[in-house]
Image (cartoon, rainbow, N blue to C red):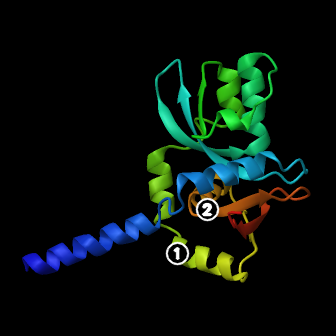
Amino acid sequence: MKTKTSILTMIVGLLFLTARAQVDEQTKYKMFCSALGNDSTAPNYIVVTVKNKKTGETKEVCTEAPFIEGAMGQETGGLTINYRNYKTRYFEFSKDSALWNISFDLYTKDDLDKYVKTINVAEIVKQVKSGKLTSKTFMGDRIEQLMFAHIMFNNGIIMKRGCIAGNICGLTYFKSK
């Protein structure tokens, strides 16, 4: 019985890990830089770690790449972001306007943990890698779209919001150069 419990615990643990970040930090940084370099009307989503300096709360946040640049502008009074200074993708903001710009309070880690259990991350990644899945349409609220993009980014998939219909998003497996 003890052996069965141990095996079950290991299987559950492995399933949980496959739903979480499966690409290394260097790849995430390259994805971040690539997204910031996309100046189209169909921006890429990025995941960054953000500290709210007023409350001390630090968490991962998914936002559209231009929005982190906008938040930096809000925080600094207009300075643009030099992504070479953000290899860890870590930002600190004290101004509410900067935090709102990146939707800091739109969802929690618990919300993300619940959501990831509703999708088959490994299968989605497999389909995107093989080219069988290139887009996803979101009919619900923006929170689901951001949480999906968050999970995809952490698994090496760049998600791009459609420029005409923001609820139709493109999915591309990131190939590190």
- Depicted 146 relative to depicted 22: above or below: above
* Left or right: where 79 falls relative to 130: right
What is the crowding at mark 2: few (fewer than 14 residues within 10 Å), some, or many (at least 20)? many
Residue furthest left as drawn: 1
Q: Quadrant of the C terminus?
A: bottom right
- Depicted 96 relative to depicted 166: above or below: above
- Depicted 134 relative to depicted 168: above or below: below
> Is any part of residue 120 visible from this angle?
no
Q: What's the residue type where badge 2 is placed?
A: Met
Q: What's the residue type where badge 1 is placed?
A: Ala
* Precedes in sequence: disc 2 or disc 1: 1
Disc number placed over residue 122 in the picture, else none: 1
Residue furthest front as drawn: 177
Helix or strand or loop: what does disc 2 sit on?
A: helix
* Left or right: where 27 falls relative to 138: left
Whole-percent x, y for residue 143 in the image: 63, 50
Counting labels gives 2
* Left or right: where 120 falls relative to 11: right
Residue at image position (58%, 52%) is 26
Query: Which image quarter: residue 162?
Result: bottom right
In the picture of the structure, the residue carrying the numbered disc 2 is 152
Whole-percent x, y for residue 76 in the image: 73, 18
Whether label 2 touches label 1, CB < 8 Å: no
Q: Quadrant of the N terminus?
A: bottom left
Residue at image position (47%, 65%) is 19
Q: CA distance from mark 2 to mark 1?
A: 10 Å
What is the crowding at mark 1: few (fewer than 14 residues within 10 Å), some, or many (at least 20)? few
